[in-house]
Image (spheres, helix red, strand yellow):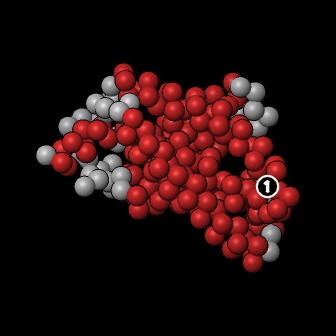
Amino acid sequence: MTTSEPTSYAWTQREILIVAVLGAVFAVLYLGWVQVWLVAQAFFGPVTMDVVMGFWFIVSIIAAAIIRKPGAALFSEMLAAGIQILLGSPAGLILLLTGFVQGAGAEAVFAATRWKRYSLPVLIAAGIGAAVFSFIYTWFRFNYGALAPGLLVLMFTLRCLSGALLAGVLGHLVVEALYKTGVLSGLPIDHARRAARA
């Protein structure tokens, strides 16, 4: 089973620390992913951002799957964005808005389950949710309305696939790998899995 019914949505100090660490780690990885984006442009051209975008959603998936409480997806993405700014990201303060939009897209999917379901299909849906929210955001930011309809459909499809795979599936694999090490013992994901086995 992959449901979780916490008796309280209040966060513990350890949970806050875990999300803070995830935000810091993925802030660095997100900055590094910019280089992947730049190199990939030689292969994918104008749709490169949509192909690689999903990785920039992944911390929201991981944090939510581990903490299983309202705000985990949103908080982790915004924290990663804030740390990227502190690390000197050339994007600047706009990253806070970007992080909010992406985190909100993933959070909306978990909210739809009332923060009780974290199966792989739900994580994939959350990755797609982040992709949809980010696409709407970048539509206005970069004036997508001026682009050809065929290109827009391709961009949207690729971004959703990227969110599903690079955020949803990869996020699931990262969580499973972390769980097997034992470092998530005592956290909501651990409580839910122990309860399911009982």
Helix, strand or loop at label 1? It is helix
Q: Residue furthest left?
A: 198
Q: Residue furthest bottom?
A: 150
Nearer the observer, 180 or 96: 180
Q: Is residue 28 left or right of residue 193?
A: right
Q: Is residue 146 left or right of residue 132?
A: right
For the residue marked with disc 1, what is the amino acid?
Answer: Ala
Q: Residue at x 81, y 68 (%)?
A: 146
Q: Which residue in the protein does label 1 denote?
A: 40
Residue 166, position in %: x, y? 58, 54
Nearer the observer, 127 or 166: 166
Q: Residue at x 51, y 36 (%)?
A: 76
Q: Is residue 186 above or below residue 180?
A: above
Q: Residue furthest right?
A: 42
Q: Residue furthest front?
A: 181
Residue 160, position in %: x, y? 59, 64
Nearer the observer, 24 or 177: 177
Residue 71 visible in the shown view? no
Residue 136, position in %: x, y? 64, 59
Residue 182 visible in the shown view? yes
Q: Residue at x 29, y 53 (%)?
A: 2
Which of the image's four quarters has the N terminus?
A: bottom left
Q: Residue at x 76, y 27 (%)?
A: 88
Q: Quadrant of residue 140?
A: bottom right
